[in-house]
Image: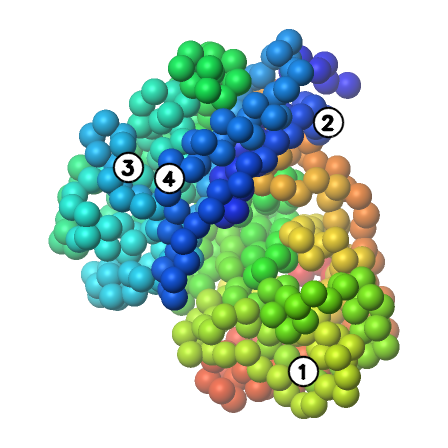
């Protein structure tokens, strides 16, 4: 067993809080802390005051390290929300608010970037950097963890390539794309970029006094929160996939080569070892349950829903208008086909609709040639529902692992251990810290029971012009094959 003095610090800059974990190499949590942060939402706008991140980190890290003054911390890494960006001046001071990952005010700038040949989505960081520059003037494009790391180390660091991806960084060429100056962003606006796992510096004495993190602690380049959750799930071997079901649904996997998608629905992060982490984010997810049944008891509703397999209705349960994975359809909206006979039946239809979307995501990945022969892991808030986990495994027709610890801060602790040289591969560091709680096996009779409803949903999505016909045909063809290992 790893000695207590060999510990790693993971820092997660989330949407509503900063979370800090102190973890040993075998996954023992020695300390944890969190502190809230608030944002401002108005229509498509969502921003935060960057000063809150540091204040919350100081509070959370002190809570995590309380009573651990003799613990040796081998390193730390920081993750942030993917696509969150701000401008800083030459001294690293914020010039603007931070536009959050889902801020949609830069749609016109995104269209300009696409016209210049850049495959970006409306909420990616690059369009928001354009909007910020036009609104606040020229500054340094700075990602959420960049600012926090600068306060830890005393200097603005290079960005990690994971956070730089949605700012337009070309991971395969390892360079910023050439059209950026034509869009009004000079080369000087962008930071240097390094791979996740690179040592960025060490905690200064000033930062140590504020955070309680010992001075001299190595600071390791992190990854986005989605990648951090994937690391925490230990889904890093080729063919492994992590399905994160929270408010929305995100699938992230591991591949020796990039997964090519001409539509841009699936994009690829670069892992520290040079392998690839393809994935996509849907607008379907558990958020529809809160919207449709505010204040409901999920466990009681799950129990009632078990009588409706399959439901009398079929849903495509979008949390918000527009879909981005497994197909791109800005005009898509939530569907309910048929009339549920009760609230329990509607709850069942929503659970099943999310599972159908999850299956369609995997069918689309198979259509693109992504490797799917490794283990599947369920994480996210919805993975706390044993009934939904079983239902999803049944609909997918494949087993799924449910880890004991899944939070992004744990993934950053594993990345810190790898970056500091405590493990030869990131996968080994992650597997050492992650613990698999249960494995859910599919029930073949239930898989067959849901096939007709899934096929009807595919046909409806195709008829509306949202799902491309070749993808629909591929999904139909896979209804007749064993998908347990693919």
Q: Picture coordinates of residue 339 (x, y %)?
A: 70, 90
User: Given the current orientation, which residue lies at the most extreme top position?
Assistant: 70
Residue 399 - label: none
Between tags 3 and 1, which lies in front?
3
Q: How would you rate the neighbour count of disc 4 (Cα within 10 Å): few for under 14, some for 14-19, many for 20 or more?
A: many
Residue drawn 61% across the image and 26% down it: 63
Residue 481 position within the rendered picture, expressed as x and y whole percent measured from the top left: 72, 72
* Mark closer to the observer (4, 2): 4
Residues at marks 3 and 2, CA–CA distance in whole angstroms: 37 Å
For marks 4 and 1, the one nearer the N-term is 4
Query: What element does badge 1 sit on?
Result: strand
Q: Which residue is mark 4?
A: 50
Q: Is residue 347 above or below residue 439?
A: below
Give the quarter of the image for residue 476. Answer: bottom right
Above or below residue 435? Residue 214 is: above
Q: Is residue 336 left or right of residue 404?
A: left
Residue behind mark 3: 94
Mark 2 element type:
loop
Above or below, comparing residue 7 to residue 434 in the picture:
above
């Amino acid at each position: 067993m790893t000695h207590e003095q060999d510990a790693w610090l993971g820092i997660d800059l989330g949407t509503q809080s900063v979370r800090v974990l102190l973890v040993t190499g075998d996954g023992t949590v020695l300390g944890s802390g969190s502190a809230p942060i608030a944002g401002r939402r108005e229509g498509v706008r969502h921003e935060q005051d960057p000063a809150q991140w540091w204040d919350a980190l100081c509070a959370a890290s002190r809570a995590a390290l309380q009573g651990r003054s003799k613990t040796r911390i081998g390193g730390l890494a920081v993750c942030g929300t993917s696509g969150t960006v701000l401008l800083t001046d030459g001294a690293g001071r914020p010039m603007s608010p931070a536009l959050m990952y889902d801020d949609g005010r830069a749609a016109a700038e995104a269209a300009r970037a696409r016209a210049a040949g850049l495959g970006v989505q409306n909420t990616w960081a690059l369009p928001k950097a354009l909007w910020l520059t036009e609104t606040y003037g020229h500054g340094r494009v700075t990602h959420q963890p960049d600012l926090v790391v600068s306060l830890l180390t005393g200097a603005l660091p290079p960005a990690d390539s994971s956070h730089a991806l949605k700012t337009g960084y070309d991971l395969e060429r390892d360079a910023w794309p050439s059209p950026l100056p034509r869009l009004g962003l000079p080369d000087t606006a962008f930071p240097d970029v390094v791979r996740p796992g690179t040592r960025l510096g060490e905690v200064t004495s000033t930062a140590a006094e504020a955070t309680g993190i010992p001075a001299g602690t190595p600071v390791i380049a992190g990854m986005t929160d989605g990648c951090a959750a994937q690391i925490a799930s230990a889904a890093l071997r080729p063919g492994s996939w992590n399905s994160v079901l929270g408010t929305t649904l995100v699938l992230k996997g591991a591949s020796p080569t990039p997964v090519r998608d001409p539509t841009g629905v699936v994009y690829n992060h670069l892992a520290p070892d040079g392998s690839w982490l393809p994935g996509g984010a849907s607008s379907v997810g558990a958020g529809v349950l809160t919207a449709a049944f505010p204040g409901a008891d999920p466990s009681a509703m799950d129990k009632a829903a078990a009588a409706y397999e399959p439901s009398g209705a079929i849903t495509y349960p979008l949390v918000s208008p527009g879909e981005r994975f497994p197909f791109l359809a800005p005009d898509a909206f939530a569907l309910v086909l048929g009339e549920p006979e009760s609230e329990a039946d509607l709850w069942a239809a929503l659970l099943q609709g999310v599972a159908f979307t999850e299956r369609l995501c995997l069918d689309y990945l198979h259509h693109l040639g992504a490797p799917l022969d490794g283990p599947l892991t369920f994480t996210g808030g919805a993975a706390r529902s044993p009934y939904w986990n079983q239902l999803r495994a049944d609909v997918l027709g494949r087993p799924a692992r449910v880890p004991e610890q899944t939070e992004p801060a744990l993934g950053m602790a594993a990345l810190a251990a790898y970056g500091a040289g405590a493990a030869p591969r990131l996968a080994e560091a992650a597997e050492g810290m992650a613990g698999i709680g249960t494995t859910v096996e599919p029930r073949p009779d239930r898989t067959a029971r849901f096939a007709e409803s899934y096929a009807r949903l595919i046909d409806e999505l195709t008829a509306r012009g949202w799902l491309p016909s070749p993808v629909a045909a591929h999904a139909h063809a896979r209804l007749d094959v064993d998908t347990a290992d693919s």
